[in-house]
Image (tube, helix red, strand yellow):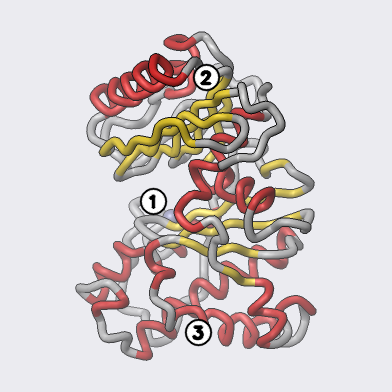
């Protein structure tokens, strides 16, 4: 998986998601020694199973020298914070304050790195996937929620906390003014309008089950284009990778490109025409592995 010159190195990787936790014990030469998926239930049960997975995997394959976590958020990533690494106020019941990083550190006595799931995925795509040869890249997921991470010069973007791109405010489509939006914090922020649950709440079905009515695709494509334009304007990154369940609807991609071009109106060279847009907006090269690979990369960097 993750190429590393030292094959005797082992790292533990966790992709912590709202519906499942993916765990892997990875050898430095790229071999995945053990791979597991644990449904996300209440924290004590879920975390006990994560610890159990690594205890068993290490017993069979040797101890990990470090761990890396790519987690759903929001997370406290402020340097020096006494609650560094903990989940902040999340709508996911019972999970606020949970500290997976400290738990793994105490249980296994090894250093543990943590970042957001999308920053981890951005790191993997930047180093091993769609961003190879570039110095900057953004990774966006559009699914149960909307999130984005940024990598620049090999480092993920974080500061007071981490990017929260899903909650940017967008201009409403005139055909979509009746729907209040689903975000519990903001109503009609981007996630409240264009995530999988927002599509379901508004039209009663996911995009691909709607028979792809043009309006729905254009409305969602238009909102996602506003995110694309905002990322390009704010970060000047060289490529944007867009993944997540909603993006498997192939007809959405040309709508995003068309709306992006219209919004930019020739101002940004990398978003000017169809050819440059096709190069700028791409699906994940690593498919569904970018998150777990990114978590392994976070761990390797501790060594
Ligand atoms: Zn929001």
Residue 296 drawn at (x, y percent): 56, 34
First-in-chain label (3 vs 1): 1
Q: Is residue 158 above or below residue 265?
A: above
Q: Do the residues under discs 2 and 1 have CB atoms within 8 angstroms? A: no
Residue 303 drawn at (x, y percent): 68, 21
Residue at image x 33%, y 64%?
Answer: 196
Q: Is residue 178 above or below residue 115?
A: below
Callout in the foreground (2, 3): 2
Q: Do the residues under discs 2 and 3 have CB atoms within 8 angstroms? A: no
Residue at which label 1 appears: 185
Q: Is residue 146 above or below residue 59?
A: below
Q: Secondary structure at mark 2?
A: loop
Callout in the foreground (3, 1): 3
Residue at image x 59%, y 63%?
Answer: 241
Mark 1 residue crowding within 10 angstroms, few (<14) / some (14–19) / many (20+): few
Residue 104 drawn at (x, y percent): 45, 18
When asked about the image quadrant of residue 257, the answer is bottom right
Ligand 1 within 8 Å of disc 3? The answer is: no
Residue at which label 3 appears: 255
């Amino acid at each position: 998986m993750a190429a590393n010159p030292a094959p005797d190195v082992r790292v533990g990787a966790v992709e912590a998601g709202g519906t499942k936790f993916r765990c892997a014990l990875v050898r430095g030469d790229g071999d995945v020694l053990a791979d597991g998926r644990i449904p996300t239930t209440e924290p004590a049960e879920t975390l006990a199973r994560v610890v159990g997975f690594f205890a068993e995997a290490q017993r069979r394959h040797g101890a990990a020298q470090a761990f890396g976590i790519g987690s759903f958020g929001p997370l406290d990533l402020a340097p020096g914070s006494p609650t560094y690494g903990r989940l902040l106020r999340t709508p996911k019941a019972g999970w606020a304050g949970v500290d997976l990083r400290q738990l793994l550190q105490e249980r296994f006595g090894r250093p543990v790195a943590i970042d957001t799931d999308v920053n981890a995925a951005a790191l993997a795509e930047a180093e091993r996937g769609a961003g190879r040869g570039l110095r900057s890249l953004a990774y966006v997921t559009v699914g149960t929620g909307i999130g984005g991470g940024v990598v620049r010069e090999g480092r993920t973007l974080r500061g007071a906390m981490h990017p929260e791109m899903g909650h940017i405010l967008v201009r409403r489509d005139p055909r979509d003014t009746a729907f209040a939006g689903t975000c519990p914090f903001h109503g009609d922020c981007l996630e409240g309008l264009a995530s999988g649950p927002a599509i379901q709440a508004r039209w009663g079905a996911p995009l691909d089950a709607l028979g792809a009515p043009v309006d729905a695709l254009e409305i969602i494509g238009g909102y996602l284009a506003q995110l694309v334009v905002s990322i390009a304007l704010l970060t000047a990154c060289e490529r944007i990778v867009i993944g997540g369940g909603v993006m498997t609807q192939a007809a959405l991609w040309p709508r995003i490109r068309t709306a992006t071009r219209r919004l930019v109106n020739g101002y940004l060279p990398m978003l000017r025409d169809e050819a440059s847009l096709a190069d700028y907006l791409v699906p994940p090269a690593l498919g569904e592995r970018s998150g777990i690979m990114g978590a392994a990369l976070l761990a390797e960097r501790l060594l």
